[in-house]
Image (spheres, rainbow, N blue to C red):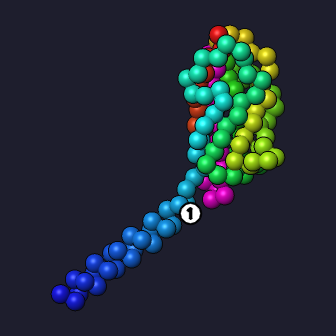
Amino acid sequence: MKAFQQSVLSALLASAAMAGFSSAWAHATLKSASPAKDAVVTTAPKEISLQFNEKLEAGFSNARLFDSTGREVTADKASMDAADPSVMKLSVPALAPGKYKVEYVSVGHDGHRRKGNYAFTVK
C-alpha cells in the first residue's frame, strides 16, 4: 500500500509541476483585433490593431495586409504600441471597398513563433 501511495503522490506532484510550467511556456496568441475577424466596416480603417496575450518581441513580430487578389497593400512594418508592447499596430493606406486579409507573426518572450490570419471587409 505504501508503494501505491508514493506512486499517487509522485503523479500528483508531477502534474502540479507541469501545470505550473504550462503557463510559463504559453505562446503569444491573438486576443482581439480591430477591425475584428469577419467584420464588415463601412469606414476603411487607417490602422490595424492586434492585441496579444503577452508582450511581443518587436524585432520578430510583424503583420501585413493583403487585398482580395493577394496583393500586399501595406508598405510599412508593423510596430509595437509604446504604452503596451502586447499591442501590434499596422498603418493602412486608403482602402477601396473589398475583402482584406491580415496575416501576422507573433513572437513572445518564450521565443516561439506563431502565425495567424483573418479577414475583414470594407463596404
Residue picked out by circle 1: 24
Can residue 114 be seen here? The reply is no
For the stretch drawn in magenta, the main secondary structure is strand
Instruction: Find the magenta span and give its range.
Output: 99-112
Q: Give the side of residue 22 with respect to residue 59, left or right.
A: left
Please say if 45 is above or below 83: above
Q: Give the side of residue 8 with respect to residue 83, left or right.
A: left
Residue 75, position in %: x, y? 80, 28
- Nearest the camera: 58 or 23? 23
Residue 84, position in %: x, y? 75, 48
Q: Residue furthest bottom?
A: 2
- Nearest the camera: 70 or 38? 38
Please say if 93 is above or below 16: above
Q: Give the side of residue 3 with respect to residue 88, left or right.
A: left
Quadrant where the C terminus sits is top right
Residue 6, position in %: x, y? 28, 85
Q: Residue at x 51, y 67 (%)?
A: 21
Can residue 47 be seen here? The reply is yes
Where on the picture, by quarter, is residue 95?
top right
**What amino acid does circle 1 point to?**
Ala
Where on the picture, by quarter, is residue 36?
top right
Numbered disc 1: secondary structure:
helix
Q: Residue at x 57, y 27 (%)?
A: 37
Q: Residue at x 63, y 59 (%)?
A: 110
Quadrant where the N terminus sits is bottom left
Residue 107, magenta (yes or no): yes
Residue 17, position in %: x, y? 45, 72
Please say if 104 is above or below 18: above
Please rate how many residues cluster around mark 1, counting C-alpha atoms within 10 Å: few if below 14, some from 14 to 19, many from 20: few
Where on the picture, by quarter, is residue 88?
top right
- Nearest the camera: 20 or 117? 20
